[in-house]
Amino acid sequence: MAIIKNKSPVLFFYNNSKKWLMNISKKESLHTHIGVLKHADAIGKEYGSRLMTNKDKYVYLLEPTMYDYIMKIQHGTQIVYPKDLGYIAARAGIQDGQKILEIGTGSGSMTSFVASIVKPRGHVYTFDVDENFMKIAEKNIRRSGVSKYVTQHNLDLKTSKDTPVTDMDVALIDLGDPWIVIPKVRQMLKGSGSIFAICPTMNQLEKLTMALVENEFTDIESTEHIIRTIEARDGKTRHSFQGIGHTTYLCFARKAFFGRKAKATTKAKATTKAKATTKAKATTKAKATTKAKATKKSTKN
Amino acid sequence: MAIIKNKSPVLFFYNNSKKWLMNISKKESLHTHIGVLKHADAIGKEYGSRLMTNKDKYVYLLEPTMYDYIMKIQHGTQIVYPKDLGYIAARAGIQDGQKILEIGTGSGSMTSFVASIVKPRGHVYTFDVDENFMKIAEKNIRRSGVSKYVTQHNLDLKTSKDTPVTDMDVALIDLGDPWIVIPKVRQMLKGSGSIFAICPTMNQLEKLTMALVENEFTDIESTEHIIRTIEARDGKTRHSFQGIGHTTYLCFARKAFFGRKAKATTKAKATTKAKATTKAKATTKAKATTKAKATKKSTKN
Amino acid sequence: MAIIKNKSPVLFFYNNSKKWLMNISKKESLHTHIGVLKHADAIGKEYGSRLMTNKDKYVYLLEPTMYDYIMKIQHGTQIVYPKDLGYIAARAGIQDGQKILEIGTGSGSMTSFVASIVKPRGHVYTFDVDENFMKIAEKNIRRSGVSKYVTQHNLDLKTSKDTPVTDMDVALIDLGDPWIVIPKVRQMLKGSGSIFAICPTMNQLEKLTMALVENEFTDIESTEHIIRTIEARDGKTRHSFQGIGHTTYLCFARKAFFGRKAKATTKAKATTKAKATTKAKATTKAKATTKAKATKKSTKN
Amino acid sequence: MAIIKNKSPVLFFYNNSKKWLMNISKKESLHTHIGVLKHADAIGKEYGSRLMTNKDKYVYLLEPTMYDYIMKIQHGTQIVYPKDLGYIAARAGIQDGQKILEIGTGSGSMTSFVASIVKPRGHVYTFDVDENFMKIAEKNIRRSGVSKYVTQHNLDLKTSKDTPVTDMDVALIDLGDPWIVIPKVRQMLKGSGSIFAICPTMNQLEKLTMALVENEFTDIESTEHIIRTIEARDGKTRHSFQGIGHTTYLCFARKAFFGRKAKATTKAKATTKAKATTKAKATTKAKATTKAKATKKSTKN
């Protein structure tokens, strides 16, 4: 039985649009439109209990899940939504032990989600070029409890000649022009490894698909995911009047070898790999070289 | 670099409707409409390579993912589809280390998927009443490589007075009448723990929702998930003419305490828990008692 | 070339959420957030021309279509949306010359739409019990220019023993409990005639379908219609972020004769028809008898 | 009460995928998988009655609607579906009395549908370049009973310098490259008149939208329409497992005057109109000049 203590994370849940995620701080209060709650009143309660505000509204004290952390990150930034994240995990078969490459850390929501699945034996290597965003992401990743399984790199893979990591199981790309990094991603992926790109527009899907074919990928699939909420009520069940619109399209593929230029590729790969592995380790240990500043998250990766 | 050997699992992939999942057996051949392939020719190749059939068709040798195992299970049985599984994982925040209760093992596809995420420190406890199905599920779970993280129980939780496991993080229900087990599931879930039910009909959503409210659950959400395939091609991008229809609706909720009958419940829970835990352990060790025959999968659970 | 005159109807169109439908009144001005326009400036312009507000925003002077009248009615009342109306017309094959029965006039939006299609040789007979709503509907029907083709009846067909009209081509039902009027509607429809019911909930579809089978209808079809807006822009084409949620489900069927109780029915029908026709005519002419107060719209129906 | 006679059109309806549309021919029989029916047995029956085949299956004798004619046309050709046709009618506000321009007659399904709505006082002017298709369309339009309200032109509006008709209320375009005819269509439309284009791909929407802006159209809207079938059954209501995929996207717009080059345009228009009107009349009367061969349908258009 999990009991809420001082500093415990709690999702104060009124309904799906009114919820607050925070750590209990015994001298603080939560002030909302539906009334005030003292954090202290939550201490000692079992997760799932509820408190009444001074405006007679019940608020539930839920134990935050990765979903709650992701939806919390949503405020103010563009995130990949759970409906899309879930399909990415299921379609690419992401699981414990895998090594994941992410290009475009953004706010860190996809990073956190994926890390929560590949842990404890897997790892996420995430790359971004915007230092401000990297700090936001670092904070978000830390809050969601998976820093240990994430290494942040400040490196532009569009232009870099380095290949900091290799033999990745899955590559996730969240860039405006994902097709540019495909040759690079190919070098970093294992054979038969999966790619998933976040493509908000149809034009991105189109250009990316052409780049994937050109770069010897197979099982290429573009999808979109529509979630519809249903209001199930006694004798009055129907879909919600409120619709949820477009978030993004997704493009999936798996690395193949067409054998067109087999020898050259094999050679190049071998070289790249040797170098890359060395570099990657160096990066991690040195914490931040000029070109590849890794914001290290843990001493154990 | 992963090389295919004798007995390696391989997905022979031609396209999304023509693909074959099997273990390499050096003396066998794969006979299909698109020609014949000798397994022996795959040995020594890197995953991702391709072979040509005697009808000049390329077939890719992919390393099977959990997705491939699930879609393989699909043939002949009703499965929960990746689009729905992914949302279940993302919405309930399923991750490494969690204990999952599953009622209705079916063909074992959801079991395998969830086990691949909660491993290595988590576990799936799955219950079914149909011994034939349990055997099919056991085989499917074994093939997908997660037996170690799954315990199968032959027990009818609709009628049983036992509570073989408790303190579950998430409960997954795939029954025709999920509302019947809600009081039982409640006893087995931790506070704030999540429930997900597979409900193919609107009527199930409706009855289940009423049972969830009655049994003090909160954050109740019914959804459906539509996946649309897009054919991204140079200058001719559009959705696929072929549509994907209804699979199932999903119902999510989290266990709360309304405090209505606080004392009685607390007491009952404590008692139940003590007994249940003892029982569960006994079950696992004894492998199969009369009432709760656990088909044990591993010596390490 | 249609020129705007004083009293001409004009849709002042800024964009799809900012548009105003009104008749030109030469001394008036239109005051909006995007600035002020003098009606007088529109006079003499061709439909399709644009004016600039005093805040430098262009507003187009469009000739209102039935769509614009329907969307105008939307403000403040629940309407049947064009996406649903269109399917009703196309599926039931509504066309010039047909006689339409409508039960539940509401705000008159469906009435107006259907009248615009069946005119000039067809007619809509619409029934409601709420006199206030009937007045609103009357106004809306008049504004959209189809009063001549509509007769409003103040009669409760759920309880009435009268059958004011018969031999209808299509019956449209917009009631909370549509199944109650099915036997009555059957009497009023021609053989093979179509029914369409507006059913916002799944439970209504379910009950109605059972009533339709019971009352010898065939080709029963329940559907829902999702419209998705696409933002087509150079190199950045995608669905709109803003989604459009549920409006209603639709239930369609066609009147058949199962021959179960052929003779009795035929006899009853004959009697009913004779009486009903007489009554209907009487009603129309007398304008308003006690039981069936017809709000007559025109001297020419 | 409509009685079936020899030569009456009848939809023999078993279910939505098994139905046959034909004219009664008293010596013929209908041979199907579900058995044989003699046409003669239908004669004298009321529409809506049912017959039993020699395999004990009930088949309903329905009076064909425009929907049935359109779905009949479907066999073997690409049609615009009722879900899309309905929206076109509702969004463009098509009604009795309007003059409709159609570019790309195809199999004549959209032509027939629209004609059934604008009749008896409106007319459809439809253009195609493929004489074989024109013959098929002519037959389909005749069968659906609206020939009188349709004039078919064999003229390529992409290249023609003629403007055979003007002052159209609505223009419907079903071409692979609709953007090419936009300047021409503009000349043929009245001010504030509507355009609807059938665009199966996103790329078409994108190019067309740019052409519409360039050519001074407003209220531009791209949509797609998803119809989902629901199986409403006692206690087991759900969406159909069978999905309906993509048919087409639709692009709507209304002709405006941006006033950019006001004088020149006005002059050009006036000239064009005069000429065009003359030409159009001539065409209709002469039946077939070299450049614009009009397949005339009636002496009354």
Image (cartoon, coloured by chain):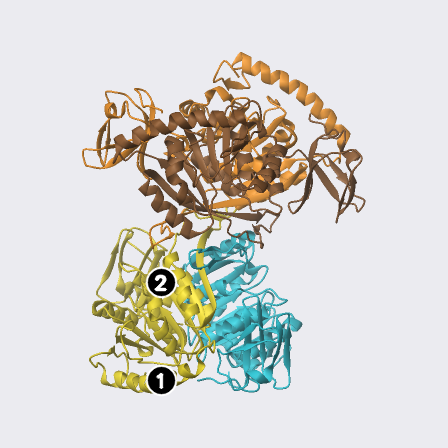
Chain colours: A brown, B orange, C cyan, D yellow
**Left of A128 or right of it: where is B182?**
right
Q: Disc 1 versus disc 2: distance between alpha carbons? A: 31 Å
Instruction: Please provide percent x and percent y for residue A60.
Output: 71, 38
> Which badge, 1 or 2, comes first in the chain's sequence?
2
Q: Amino acid at mark 1?
A: Lys
Q: Which mark is residue D80?
A: 2
Q: Chain of mark 1?
A: D
Q: Chain of mark 2?
A: D
Give the crowd class for mark 1: few <14, some 14-19, many >=20 residues within 10 Å. Answer: some
Give the SS element for disc 2.
loop
Q: Nearer the viewer, residue C156 or A126?
A: A126
Image quadrant where one finds the N terminus of chain B: top left
Q: Position of residue C45 (x, y in %)?
A: 51, 84
**Labelled disc at residue A262:** none
Res A159 → quadrant: top left
Please give the count of numbered marks on the rendered protein.
2
Disc 2 crowd rating (10 Å Cα; few below 14, some 14-19, many 20+) is: many
Which residue type does callout 2 highlight? Val
Taking the view exactly as shown, the residue that stands out farthest to the front is A290
Hey, which residue is sitting farthest left in the picture?
Answer: B54
The image shows residue A299, relative to residue A211, as above or below, that is above
Instruction: Give residue D273's mark.
Output: 1
Corner quadrant of residue B109: top left
